[in-house]
């Protein structure tokens, strides 16, 4: 039996955080051995907010290098830039025409990103239709993402059903694939907000490329409640529960093991060990990252990825256009 298809992507905006790593990237690495994987850098999505050209290029390379440094093997998985496979933009347009305004108006990510802005680009609004195209182009079965993408995935499934109903069976209906622990890593300074690289307070997130001492400092300053019990209770102890999730994922321990380890010890020793667990998880990635960026191999990998992805995507786009009544030459 052929392997199930997996596809996911991250935006090349700002630095990747521990939230990106735990919520998505760790699962990319895990799935590559058992599934037929496509991992892209969604640089078309990045320009839904203004980007400086030099920075966009640098960050696209940086995210690609972080994928590889985290353990994605480009000979096993297909790694590519979204903008290099033009079928994404083309199917994105067709998906936009299939999407209702009301569906996009309900998207919480749009509401959050547009809140308080005087003017908002139309691309930010239609962003989920392009994401649907990304996924549907590849007969994707599983999409490894964090919790915040649930609503976008629901829309993708609805659009796939709608297309299939209108034009005949074409698209596979994809499912999300979420980590059991840490599908939503929260800010270190406010456990009601998700950890995000776009936060103005750098102390609120751990970047995958933060130096070990910076990581230690950020964790020592992370907000906790005034109690002292290391207990996983997201309702009543959201800050500590968030730190336990991070610990569990970085040290490959269960929540119960961590609770037992720190029983009666208070937050001090727990935070200290947590910092070391995060450093131990990220340090080897940081070393490989530096090697990959200086090796000059990135563009060859991305060229190979583009070719493989294009071969798949072009086939699907052709099928879609034929079904819709386009003259395909
Ligand atoms: P983005 O940085 O928005 O392109 O997100 C890339 C991937 O990381 C998506 O699958 C997100 O769901 C995931 N992600 C981003 N932030 C977090 C977080 N704080 N916790 C868990 N997953 C996250
Ligand atoms: N919207 C996703 C995010 O912000 C990024 C994304 C774009 C994506 N296209 C995708 C994720 C396709 C999975 C599959 O994180």
Image (tube, rainbow, N blue to C red):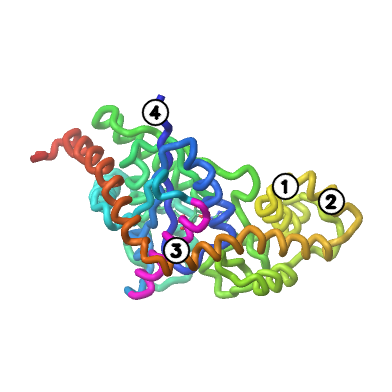
Mark 1 touches mark 3? (CB < 8 Å): no
Residue under numbered circle 3:
292
SS for dot 4: loop
Is residue 316 placed above or below 246 in the rendered structure?
A: above
Measure the alpha-carbon separation of dots 3 and 4: 31 Å
Disc with the residue nearer the chain's start (1 vs 4): 4
Between residues 140 and 94, which one lies in front from this camera angle? 140
Disc with the residue nearer the chain's start (3 vs 4): 4
Is residue 98 placed above or below 21 in the rendered structure?
A: above
SS for dot 1: loop
Image mark for residue 253: 1
Residue 17: which quarter of the image?
bottom right
Image mark for residue 314: none
Residue under numbered circle 2:
261
Magenta region, residue range: 54-71
Specify few, some or many for label 2: CA neighbours under 10 Å numbering under 14, 14-19, or 20 or more.
few
The location of residue 285, given as percent across then percent down, is: 55, 60
Measure the alpha-carbon separation of dots 1 and 3: 29 Å
For the stretch drawn in magenta, the main secondary structure is helix
Foreground disc of the pair 2, 3: 3
Mark 2 touches mark 1? (CB < 8 Å): yes
Q: State whether residue 147 appears in this view.
A: no
SS for dot 3: helix
The location of residue 311, given as percent across then percent down, is: 25, 42
Is residue 19 placed above or below 210 in the rendered structure?
A: above
| Residue at horizontal 29 percent and vertical 45 percent from the top | 308
């Amino acid at each position: 039996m052929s392997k199930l298809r997996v596809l996911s992507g991250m935006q090349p905006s700002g630095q990747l955080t521990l939230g990106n790593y735990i919520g998505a990237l760790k699962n990319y690495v895990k799935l590559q051995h058992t599934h037929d994987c496509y991992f892209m850098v969604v640089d078309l999505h990045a320009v839904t907010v203004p980007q400086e050209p030099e920075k966009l290029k640098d960050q696209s390379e940086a995210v690609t290098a972080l994928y590889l440094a985290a353990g994605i093997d480009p000979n096993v998985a297909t790694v590519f830039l979204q903008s290099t496979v033009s079928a994404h933009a083309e199917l994105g347009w067709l998906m936009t025409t299939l999407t209702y305004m009301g569906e996009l108006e309900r998207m919480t990510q749009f509401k959050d990103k547009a809140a308080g802005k005087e003017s908002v680009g139309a691309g930010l609004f239609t962003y989920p239709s392009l994401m649907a195209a990304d996924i549907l182009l590849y007969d994707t079965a599983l999409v490894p993402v964090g919790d915040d993408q649930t609503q976008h995935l629901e829309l993708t499934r609805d659009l796939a059903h709608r297309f299939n109903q209108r034009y005949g069976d074409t698209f596979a209906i994809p499912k999300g694939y979420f980590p059991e622990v840490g599908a939503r890593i929260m800010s270190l300074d406010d456990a009601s907000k998700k950890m995000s690289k776009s936060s103005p307070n750098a102390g609120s997130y751990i970047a995958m490329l933060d130096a070990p001492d910076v990581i230690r400092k950020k964790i020592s300053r992370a907000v906790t409640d005034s109690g002292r019990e290391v207990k996983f209770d997201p309702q009543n102890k959201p800050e500590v529960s968030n730190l336990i999730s991070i610990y569990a994922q970085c040290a490959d321990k269960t929540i119960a093991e961590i609770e037992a380890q720190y029983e009666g010890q208070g937050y001090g020793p727990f935070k200290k060990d947590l910092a070391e667990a995060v450093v131990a998880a990220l340090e080897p990635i940081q070393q490989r990252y530096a090697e990959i960026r200086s090796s000059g191999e990135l563009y060859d990998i991305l060229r190979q990825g583009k070719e493989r992805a294009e071969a798949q995507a072009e086939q699907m786009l052709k099928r879609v256009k034929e079904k819709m009544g386009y003259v395909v030459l």
